[in-house]
Image (cartoon, rainbow, N blue to C red):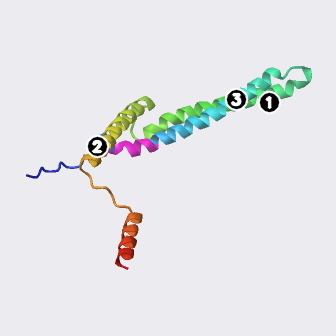
Amino acid sequence: MKTERPSQPKPSVLASKYPHLKEIDSKLKDQNKAIFEREKKRDKLKKELSECTGIFKDGRRRELQQEIGNINNQISNMKKRLSSIVQEYSFDSVQVFYKKFNAAKKENQDYEVACAEYEKNYGEKVVDSKSVRNRLRQKDVGAR
């Protein structure tokens, strides 16, 4: 008596959205990385400003303060851009996006585990081209 083979697992709606959400996450991480670089530059300038003392360095102090102010504005705008990135994809905020992203990630992991379990129990192994070539060679050698 043959038992019927169950159908392959299907990804949930959320799991199927995971690759798209992962792209958005990548954009957010790139933006965060850029913000971090600007903050490091600002911190270096602040350190230089704190070491810039004396009557003759007044002009340099003003330059550094202006540069720090410009970088602070850039950082502020870059942080606002984080929100606009997720809003482009119809999310209310970065927090809402990450809540959905983490749920999709979990669903996707569950789907991958289910697929691996299915392959282990019911799947036929995918034949790679090397093994086909090797079998043909073996048949060719056996025929000689």
Mark 1–mark 2 distance (CA, rounded to whole Å): 63 Å
- SS at circle 2: helix
- SS at circle 3: helix
Q: Which residue is mark 1?
A: 63
Q: Which residue is mark 3?
A: 42
| The C terminus - image quarter | bottom left
x, y percentage for residue 80? 53, 33
x, y percentage for residue 8? 23, 49
Would you say residue 60 is visible in this rendering?
Answer: yes
Q: Are marks 3 and 2 in contact (CB under 8 Å)?
A: no
Residue at position x 70%, y 29% from top? Answer: 42
Mark on residue 117?
2
Seen from the viewer's position, the closer of residues 124 and 78 is: 124
What residue range appears in magenta? 16-23
Seen from the viewer's position, the closer of residues 62 and 75 is: 75
The image shows a total of numbered marks equal to 3
Mark 1: amino acid:
Glu
Mark 3–mark 1 distance (CA, rounded to whole Å): 13 Å
Mark 2: amino acid:
Glu
Predominant SS along the magenta part:
helix
Q: Say left or right for 34 vs 143.
A: right
